[in-house]
Each structure stands twice: as structure tokens, then as C-alpha cells.
Image: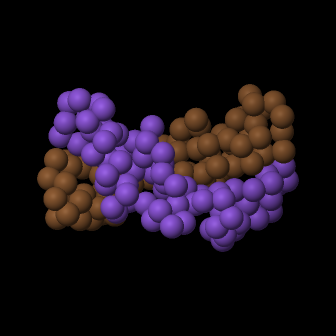
Chain colours: A purple, B brown
Amino acid sequence: MKIKVIVTLKNGVLDPQGKAIQQTLNGMGFSSVNEVRQGKFFEVDVNEKDEAKAKIKVEDMCKKLLANLVIENFEIL
Amino acid sequence: MKIKVIVTLKNGVLDPQGKAIQQTLNGMGFSSVNEVRQGKFFEVDVNEKDEAKAKIKVEDMCKKLLANLVIENFEIL
């Protein structure tokens, strides 16, 4: 089954990519945009029919590879 | 208010980054991983209190900048 994961920068970690997107949006006329933060999204197809077990595996993958826990949080959807 | 957006590659579009992650996970012992697809995540802070109006604005931003609709789909959470 497919498990979806979002990895985001922790609060306080600078996000120059998000800042560039925000400035571009402002320049395009979207003046109401205060801030943009960019993160990553993963869809992991695990050979496991039990959703709870699949999520435990994906959590382990996040801790070991997909997210850098020093500067990033992850959320399994 | 903050609106969350996920941008993913359309089915059929090659995802070498996702493939590399899948192979790395397999190599790390996660042999049950069949496929990984990577996408992008954005959190857009819009100066707009009405959620429906904020989402309409963010949808417009997705069409004009955040997603390449030729090869990507977007989903507003």
C-alpha cells in the first residue's frame, strides 16, 4: 500500500527557497502572500497490506533516510 | 491563514529522484519498498481570513507558478 509523507523544515530554520517563491509570487501580483515554506513530499509504496504496519515501516524510513531530524520534521498522512 | 499544497508528478512521468530513494531504501534493508515517488510540499501563508477565498488564491498560484501542469498535479489540503 501507498503511504504519504510530508517532510518540512523546523520552525526557525531558514528557507531561502521558500523566500524566493514568496518574493516571486509578490512580484507576480499576489501581494497577500506573507510567507512560503517549502518541504518535500514522498509517496512510498510498501509491500505490506496492514496499514498500521506499513506506517511503522515508513516512520522508520523517515528517521533513517527521508528526513534530517536535526532540521526537519516529518508527518505521515 | 496557512494553506498547504502538495505537487506531485503525473503518472507516467519518470521520477529518477524517487527511483534513487527506492534503491537506497532497498539497499538499507527495506526490501519491501516497491516504489517511491517524490513531490513537493508548500505551505503558503496568505493574508486572508476566509478559508475558501484563500484556497482560491492558492489554486491560482499553483496554476501560475507552483506546479507545472504539463507534468505535475497539485492538491490543496
Say whether residue B45 is visible.
yes
Pick whichever, A63 or A19, lies toward us: A63
Q: Residue at x 31, y 54 (%)?
A: A61
Residue A40, position as x, y percentages in the image: 49, 56
Q: Quarter holding the C terminus of chain B?
A: top right
Is residue B7 depicted above or below A69 in this figure? above
Q: Quarter holding the N terminus of chain B?
A: top right
The answer to which quarter of the image holds residue A38 is: bottom right
Does residue B49 appear to the left or right of A53 in the view shown?
right
Is residue B15 depicted above or below A14 in this figure? above
Q: Residue at x 33, y 39 (%)?
A: A55
Residue B33, position as x, y percentages in the image: 21, 49
Say whether residue B72 is visible.
no
Does residue B29 appear to the left or right of A16 in the view shown?
left
Pick whichever, A10 or B49, lies toward us: A10
Pick whichever, B65 or A16, lies toward us: A16
Q: Residue at x 85, y 53 (%)?
A: A31
